[in-house]
Amino acid sequence: MPLNYHRTIPDVFAEASREFSDSAVYTCMDHTITFRELDNLSGKFAAYLQQHTNLKPGDRVAIQLPNILQYPIAVFGAMRAGMIVVNTNPLYTAHEIKHQLNDSGAKALIVLANIAKNASTIIKDTAVEQVIVTELGDIHPPLKKLLINVVVKYVKKLVPEFSFPNQITFNHALKMPSKPWQPVAISPEDVAVLQYTGGTTGVAKGAMLSHRNLVANMEQLNAHMVEAFRRNQETYIAPLPLYHIYSFTLHCTSSVALGNHSILIPNPRDIPGFVETLKKYPFTLFVGLNTLFNALLRNPEFHTLDFSKLRLTSSGGMALVAETANKWKAATSAPITEGYGLTETSPVVCSNQINVLQYGTVGRALPETECKVVDENGKSLPVGEAGELCIRGPQVMKGYWQRPEATAEVIDSEGWFKSGDMAVISADGFIKIVDRKKDMINVSGFKVYPNEVEDVLGSHPDIIEAAVIGVPDKDGSEIVKAFVVSSKPELDVKTVRDFAKTKLTAYKVPHQIEFCKDLPKSNVGKVLRRELRDKEIAKANS
């Protein structure tokens, strides 16, 4: 059956809301909303944007929220009003938020009160006209809402003081409209989401993902996983952040279109609390990544859970370690299917399937997705040879926001996207990722680009130059290591790390710092990160 991806996300949402109106769509902190309720709330938010702001279709709306019910309400509301969603990491520093807001030209920001202070310090230097602030319990029933918000703000003191020139509360915004929202003419080719990624340069760029891109990937994924993703029968566990494109596609398009239910986990780092949530729901699908699986497996209470309904665990965002997969299968009796994707491909390119599973690979390409590997000259390589993985399909982005030259570097005239990852494709179509062409570091599923960290370190007055690499961590992830050449012998590790913390999100801050007299370089002066990595490997093996 041909895939129907010539639709918009509001079209998909409207169809699902009609068909599954009384079914649960999201649960968070023990409060569940149905498709009908989400339809109503997101419609009110769309009406607020249309009637009480100066925003117009095509304007950008930045959303900086964890996995709480306000996130899907804001996303579907903004899209129904014809606006472009800018997914913004709640962990960002003020420096990172400022870049993303200015690069995207966002005119509105929706932010959780707990993390609003960083944005409040730079908002005057952006084009943001309206800030909508929400508290953790805002979508819950009145008494529970009051209890949650009072405990968070006054007992746990998790809400620092902040102030925006033009702010409104999320709940006030939902109450303001006097008329229903008005449908907007949206083309499938219009940009739906600006999803920021570092690319090869480390400068965060917005991948323009159109409605067609995202709906296509939803259709491809649901067709590829048809035996695992049943209609109106699945309960997904959603610990990965919805602002990450992998989680966004699974929980905001794929599961919604099928009428399924996602349990949102606001803080998956709280493993005991996470396990307590898992006890309450007979979940059928679990979405995670290697470091999270390991953390859960180390928790004794996790092993007491009822896994009788769990049919499948989906892994993405970083490489799945075979030992972890085996331990998970032994503990839960459910297999892990690993897949592969990129921000620029909306994101899923290929995945193992519940009935066709090859550990050590990332499965076969999704329907209507072409994959090939090429050498350094762009020539296609035969089966079994390693080369750069290139992808062509309806899920490939339109390009990078306002960066035509950067777009031309990764998408050729025939529509092939160059992933920057080295892979081997077997005769039966299974794909194995063998190496990274880029120097990207993968910290528990989060991408860290060495150039960005090096630029920050290089701005310290006592640092002459720095090189950054990823070194293996004990949980199968990587940690950031920096090699620093300093002009002052007294410069110490703590000073460097404290400086980095002022400009970088925590996972980007170097975990290890080594001072050295100089850095290995090529004859044209380029720092040779490969030599540094090779020395680290030799040191580990000695």
Image (cartoon, helix red, strand yellow):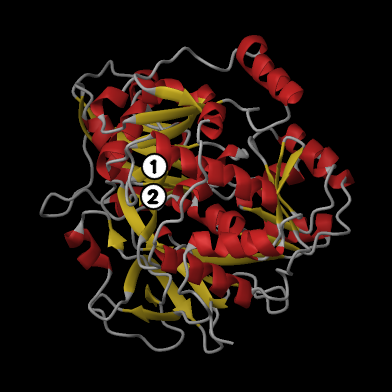
Q: Is residue 261 left or right of residue 129?
A: right
| The one of 517 and 91 positioned closer to us in this rendering | 91
- Numbered label attached to residue 83: 2
Which residue, given by chain and number where applicable, does mark 1 sit on? 61
**Residue displayed at 66% across by 15% down:** 150
Q: Is residue 224 above or below residue 99?
A: below
Residue 249 visible somewhere in the drawing: yes
Residue 531: x and y, percent?
A: 31, 52
| The one of 134 and 341 positioned closer to us in this rendering | 134
The amino acid pointed to by label 2 is: Met
Residue 533: x and y, percent?
A: 37, 50
Circles 1 and 2: CB distance less than 8 Å? yes
Residue 468 quadrant? top left
Numbered marks: total? 2
Q: Is residue 335 above or below residue 28?
A: below
Give SS at disc 1.
Answer: strand
Residue 81: x and y, percent?
A: 43, 49
- Numbered label attached to residue 80: none
| The one of 183 and 245 positioned closer to us in this rendering | 183
Give SS at disc 2.
Answer: loop
Residue 258 quadrant? bottom right
**Residue displayed at 26% across by 42% down:** 103
Q: Is residue 104 above or below residue 350?
A: above
Residue 254 visible somewhere in the drawing: no
